Structures are given as structure tokens and as C-alpha cells.
Image (cartoon, helix red, strand yellow):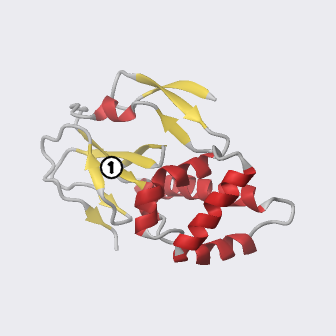
């Protein structure tokens, strides 16, 4: 399903694609913010797959990010292809091989394991977005959206900078006037 959505802090509207698993793709959102001066706000993004270290090693996440997202979106629909991808992940990634046992153990009896695995990966991304929205509640930081595995958020362009719940590698997209470039992490 696709809908046109206005972009926070801008006068732009872009198409947003909704996958059946709950993951969204906000087409062209980077270009809406990149280098823009946004009413005293700074917009950043980070790759939420970097937080999946309970599921995969960092090397697997870096190398197979597109495949992991395709699975989470429900785009790998051929059962043989899906099975082969999962078997390869199990063989090459010890973290995934261990985690898949837990995922299997949590699979409801009325659900196929493949569907359960897809939902588990998709839920990871929706949970990251939800956790950040909860963490930012009552604070100047705001989650804009989760698009294709990247979380976009904003904060006030002042000296304090954002407070984030996780140590993540953030990319600054918008123009910065007052912020000193420091990220702070809750620990």
C-alpha cells in the first residue's frame, strides 16, 4: 500500500510504501532533509540494523543488510529461496545459529516457522522505532519515521545536542547552525 505523506519541518510530500510486515519505505526522505535549514531543528538518521547484534554478527549485518531487510519486509516469498538463505545464515553466522534456536522455541504452534521468523525480524524494526519514541517522550528529540531500516529523528539546534538510548553511528542530514556536533548517550 502506498500513500503520500507530508514531511515534518518541510513543505514536501513523499510516497510512503507500507509492507505487510509493518515496515515502511519513505521514498526520497534523505533528499528532503539533506542540507536543509529546518526551523531550528537538526535531522539525523542511523541504521537500526546496527542494533541487531543479538541476531547477527556485525560482519553479517554489514554484508547482508539488504537481504535481512528483504526478509523482514516479507519480500523473500519463494520457500526454497527463503530456506536456502536461512541455511546460509546458520552456517556462516554463529550468533544467528544460536538465536534461531530461541526464535524456533518461541514459535506458536499455529504459525509456520518461516512466517514467525519474518515477523520476528520485522518486529525488531518496529520495536526500535517504538522504543525511541518512548525514550524521547517529554524530551526535545522527536522520531520522524523508520524508513527501510533507518530511524530518522530530530532535535533542537542548540548547544546541548541529542540524548540517545543506544550508542549508534548517526548521520547528520540537515543544516546545523548552533549545535556543537556532540551526541550524548544514556547509560
| Left or right of 83, for residue 59 | left
Classify 160 as above or below 94.
Answer: above
Q: Quadrant of the C terminus?
A: bottom left
Q: Quadrant of the N terminus?
A: top right
Q: Residue at x 61, y 58 (%)?
A: 85
Q: Residue at x 13, y 40 (%)?
A: 177
Return the x and y of residue 139 as percentages of the image width and height: 36, 53
For residue 82, which quarter of the picture?
Answer: bottom right
Q: Residue at x 76, y 67 (%)?
A: 107
Q: Nearer the viewer, residue 112 or 151?
A: 112
For residue 57, which quarter of the picture?
Answer: bottom left
Q: Residues within 10 Å of mark 1 (few under 14, many from 20)?
A: few
The reply to whether residue 119 is in sight is no
Return the x and y of residue 176 as percentages of the image width and height: 17, 41
Q: Residue at x 15, y 52 (%)?
A: 159
| Left or right of 176, for residue 7 | right
Return the x and y of residue 154 as percentages of the image width and height: 33, 44
| Left or right of 86, for residue 32 | left
Residue position marked by numbered label 1 in the rendering: 140
Counting every numbered tag in the picture gives 1
Dot 1: element: loop
The reply to whether residue 2 is in sight is yes
Amino acid at each position: 500500500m502506498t500513500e503520500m505523506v507530508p514531511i515534518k519541518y518541510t513543505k514536501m510530500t513523499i510516497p510512503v510504501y507500507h509492507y505487510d510486515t509493518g515496515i515502511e519505505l519513505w521514498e526520497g526522505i534523505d533528499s528532503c532533509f539533506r542540507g536543509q535549514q529546518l526551523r531550528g531543528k537538526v535531522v539525523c538518521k542511523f541504521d537500526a540494523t546496527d542494533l541487531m547484534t543479538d541476531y547477527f554478527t556485525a560482519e553479517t549485518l554489514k554484508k547482508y543488510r539488504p537481504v535481512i531487510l528483504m526478509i523482514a519486509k516479507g519480500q523473500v516469498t519463494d520457500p526454497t529461496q527463503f530456506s536456502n538463505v536461512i541455511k546460509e545464515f546458520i552456517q556462516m553466522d554463529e550468533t544467528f545459529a544460536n538465536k534461531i534456536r530461541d526464535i524456533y522455541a518461541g514459535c506458536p504452534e499455529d504459525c509456520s516457522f518461516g512466517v514467525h521468523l519474518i515477523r520476528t525480524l520485522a518486529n525488531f524494526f518496529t520495536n526500535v522505532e517504538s522504543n525511541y519514541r518512548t525514550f524521547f517522550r517529554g524530551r526535545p528529540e522527536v522520531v520522524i519515521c523508520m524508513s527501510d531500516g533507518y530511524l530518522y529523528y530530530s532535535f533542537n539546534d542548540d548547544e546541548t545536542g541529542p540524548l540517545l538510548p543506544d550508542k549508534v553511528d548517526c548521520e547528520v542530514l540537515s543544516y546545523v547552525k548552533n549545535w556543537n556536533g556532540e551526541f550524548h548517550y544514556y547509560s
